[in-house]
Amino acid sequence: MDLSQLYAMLHCRLGSFLFTYIGLPLNPITLSKADWQPLNDRVDKRLAVWKGHSLSRGGRLIIVNSVPTCLPLYYMSFFFLPQWVINHIDRDVLSSIKEIAMSLEENI
């Protein structure tokens, strides 16, 4: 008996196993680069909030320090983060800190 006969007998269809549960992509094999991209996008989106001039410098620093810690930590409770994801987050954080430092220098 082949799989197509089994599917017909059970009245089901073949689908992919990758799905999202509580915001995490679940897959029985290693996650691809496309599966990790939502984490990078979420970190980028949350870091972009501090660029609004309505936040104080202290508020900006709190966001820059907390966002890159909380979101990846949630993912790391289930998966090992690939090195390229860690490098991407580090690069975003460093550029954000540099922008805050430059804005401080401009106001002096």
Image (spheres, rainbow, N blue to C red):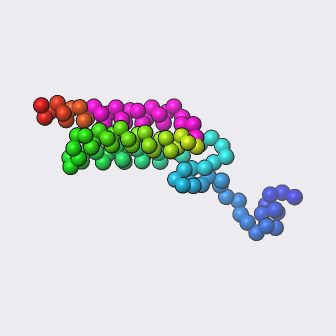
The answer to whether 33 is drawn above or below residue 20 in the figure is: above
Q: Determine whether, in the image, residue 52 is placed left or right of residue 13.
A: left
- Please tell me which residue is depicted at 21% across the width and 32% down the height of the picture: 102
Residue 32 appears in the figure: no
Q: Determine whether, in the image, residue 88 is placed left or right of residue 10.
A: left
Q: Determine whether, in the image, residue 91 is placed left or right of residue 34.
A: left
Q: Determine whether, in the image, residue 51 is placed left or right of residue 24.
A: left
The answer to whether 72 is drawn above or below residue 105 in the figure is: below
Observer-nearest of 23 and 12: 23
In the image as oriented, which residue stretches furthest toward the right?
A: 1
- Please tell me which residue is depicted at 65% across the width and 53% down the height of the picture: 17
- Please tell me which residue is depicted at 47% across the width and 41% down the height of the picture: 72
Residue 65 image position (x, y, % from top left): 35, 38
Residue 59 image position (x, y, % from top left): 27, 43
Residue 11 image position (x, y, % from top left): 76, 69
Observer-nearest of 33 and 83: 83
Classify the position of the N terminus by image quarter: bottom right
Observer-nearest of 54 and 48: 54
Label total for image: 0
> What range is drawn magenta here?
79-98
Residue 71 appears in the figure: yes
Q: Is 1 one of the magenta-colored residues?
A: no
- Please tell me which residue is depicted at 41% across the width and 33% down the height of the picture: 90
- Image quadrant assignment for residue 58: top left
Q: Is 90 one of the magenta-colored residues?
A: yes
Q: Main secondary structure of the magenta part?
A: helix
Residue 44 image position (x, y, % from top left): 38, 44
Classify the position of the C terminus by image quarter: top left
The answer to whether 89 is drawn above or below residue 37 in the figure is: above
Observer-nearest of 14 and 102: 102
